[in-house]
Amino acid sequence: MSNTAALPLDRSTTELGIIGLGDMGRLYARMFADAGWTVNACDLPERYDELRAEFGGERRISILKDGFAVVRRSDFVIFSVETSSIDAVVARFGPAMKLGSIACGQTSVKAPEIAAFEKYLPDDIQIVTCHSLHGPNVNPHGQPLVVIRHRSDQRSFDFVVGVLEALGSDMVYLDAKEHDRITADTQAVTHVAFLSMGTTWKTQSTFPWENPSYVGGIENVKTIMALRIYGSKWHVYSGLALMNPSVMTQVNQYARSVSDLFKLMIQENEAEFVKRIKTAREFVFGSFERSPILLSDGLLDQFSLSAIPKHQRKPNSHLSLLAIVDCWWNQGIKPYDHLICQTPPFRLLLGITEFLFRNEDMLDEAIQAALYDKSIRPDDCEFYTATKGWVECIGLGSPEAYRQRFEETARFFADRATQGKQVSAKMVELIAQKTHPIASAEDGPKRPIN
């Protein structure tokens, strides 16, 4: 890499650029502007007038007509576009970037992003990329922010870190391969679990808040997080699922775990079923020396969408959660090691799974329901089918197939989507405030090694 001119660090003379003003792009633009930076931003040409009207009163944000206008005048440019679009967008605008400037991406999968940067950017452009591990409806303060120093001098890297500090996030420093491996280990299975729950309820034509089997703290998290995902845009999840090379290993194992446990359930093979569950519990959770993530069932009761009294709750097999632990065990994954790279859905899925496995009475109730309660068996059968369907869909690698499957279920929950996002944001914020920090010193790097 050539030696570039010193990057100006004065906010009065340095300009930031954002290509892509979706929900995350707008969040970044406003937070950088609030921190005193000048921001140049653009989106598709047909959104120009709309965005000019939206940002008209924000003096530090300039809406420009296209990416060429952004990159020619910006010292630091974030490509905030979908993973599936990153190659085409960088190919178009990357070669025109200002001499000695810095390129950054905000995609959830870094392999195609880094490949595009290396292919299209001039050698004098430095590369420091990132990934905010939360959605636009979550306050970034205290949430994980992965920062990847791929090709840069120390001055430019320090500059990027200084800019990103405006988000108030908890920065974690990884390389691109580490990022993609950890997000596959955590997010991929998490998304398939919640997506499959939603598809199960849609197939059953049953809203979970109207079913006595989905009452209580754990069920509130399942319902709210499924609504949160289906209330978002499909491409937020498809990019990770379809373009991360590590994903299929994880989701295939989750499907096998669901299938294996379901077969033992319908055979009522209690000895083998219990042995498998308890062995997986010992591997994943050990002696439960950590502080619990969710603290108490009562804490989560306030997020209920159900009008059914809690005393009318029926036992649930929790097949989705039993299979998560079985999957981690089979893959040799210690989920707590990945809290440095957590997302709110992963943290909450780990939290409710931990809650179930820490409570011996609740776990035994789930095991008995899984093996012998025929009233929950139809839901378990549909969950098994939904999981298989989602994993097969991901294996096809087709964005269109993913979109159709996602939107079909999303329409079923459309009337509650907004409420789900609002309640989930409150849930995420409360859990973040009341639980231990996301990472300790031994969990992973908190500062970069120069």
Image (cartoon, helix red, strand yellow):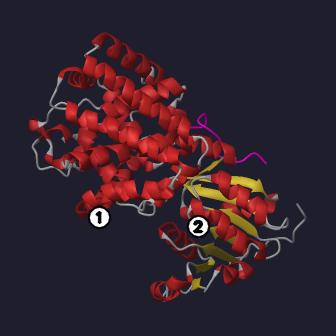
Secondary structure under tag 1 reads helix
Up-down relation of residue 55 to residue 380 (above or below): below
Secondary structure under tag 2 reads loop
Q: Magenta stretch containing residue 376, yes or no?
A: no
Q: Which residues are magenta?
A: 440-450
Up-down relation of residue 193 to residue 100 (above or below): above
In the rendered structure, find residue 312 and report the number of the disc placed on it.
none
Instruction: Name the residue beneath numbered marker 2.
Output: 80
Mark 2 burial class by Cα count in 10 Å: few <14, some 14-19, many 20+: many
**Going by the image, does 53 lie left or right of 447?**
left
Q: Nearer the viewer, residue 141 or 77?
A: 77
Judge whether residue 437 can be spotted in this image.
Answer: no
Disc 2 marks which amino acid? Ser
Up-down relation of residue 397 to residue 32 (above or below): above
* x then y, percent, for residue 362: 25, 26
Q: Magenta stretch containing residue 441, yes or no?
A: yes
* x then y, percent, for residue 376: 19, 32
Rendered residue at 66%/55% (across/down)? 112
* Quadrant in which residue 301 is drawn: top left
